[in-house]
Amino acid sequence: MADEKDRLGEALQKKKRGDEEKYFAEIERERLANLRAQQDAEARAQRVGACPRCGHTLLVREVKGIAVDECPSGDGVWLDAGELEQLGGSSLEERSSMLKTVLSDLGILGKRR
């Protein structure tokens, strides 16, 4: 009878360890998948001329003498450092007005996805 209890206890311990290993292995797999997804997103964003959202090659369009980067799949429009200031004046209202003009010229203003 004592041998039977010992074997049963050992079997329960093995099952418990196996369940714990499965649990932690699954957590580790999820963490690695999340890290890979984050690294892929960061790598896409760092590619020169690539959309930071979808990774497509950005199209460069000139509007009012400024090169505007536009995603061909419609995920956004980007201005490089200092380009917003070049488009408009120094006040927020002037920049906002000029930005509306640029977006309108690109055919983006009023578009809904």
Image (cartoon, rainbow, N blue to C red):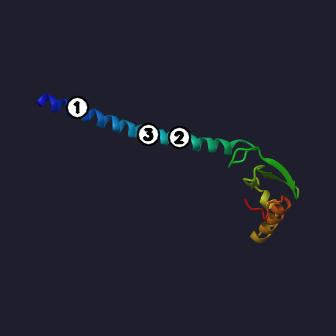
Where residue 68 appears, as percent x and y from the top left, is 81, 53
Give the residue at mark 2: 33
Tell me the quarter of the image containing the C terminus: bottom right
Q: Is residue 4 left or right of residue 105?
A: left
Give above or below for 58 relative to 64: above
Give the residue at mark 1: 10
Three-letter amino acid code of the residue under disc 2: Ala
Give the residue at mark 3: 26
Three-letter amino acid code of the residue under disc 1: Glu
How dense is the environment of label 2, judged by Cα within 10 Å: few (below 14), some, or many (20 and up)? Answer: few
Where residue 91 appears, as percent x and y from the top left, is 77, 70
Of helix, strand and loop, which one carries label 3?
helix
How dense is the environment of label 1, judged by Cα within 10 Å: few (below 14), some, or many (20 and up)? Answer: few
User: Residue, x 25% and y 35% (percent of image)?
Assistant: 12
Cα distance in 3D space between marks 3 and 1: 24 Å
Asked which quadrant contains residue 108, the reply is bottom right
Of helix, strand and loop, which one carries label 2?
helix
Three-letter amino acid code of the residue under disc 3: Glu
- Which numbered disc, 3 or 1, marks the residue that appears first in the sequence? 1
User: Residue, x 74% and y 42% (percent of image)?
Assistant: 48
Asked which quadrant contains residue 99, the reply is bottom right
How dense is the environment of label 3, judged by Cα within 10 Å: few (below 14), some, or many (20 and up)? Answer: few
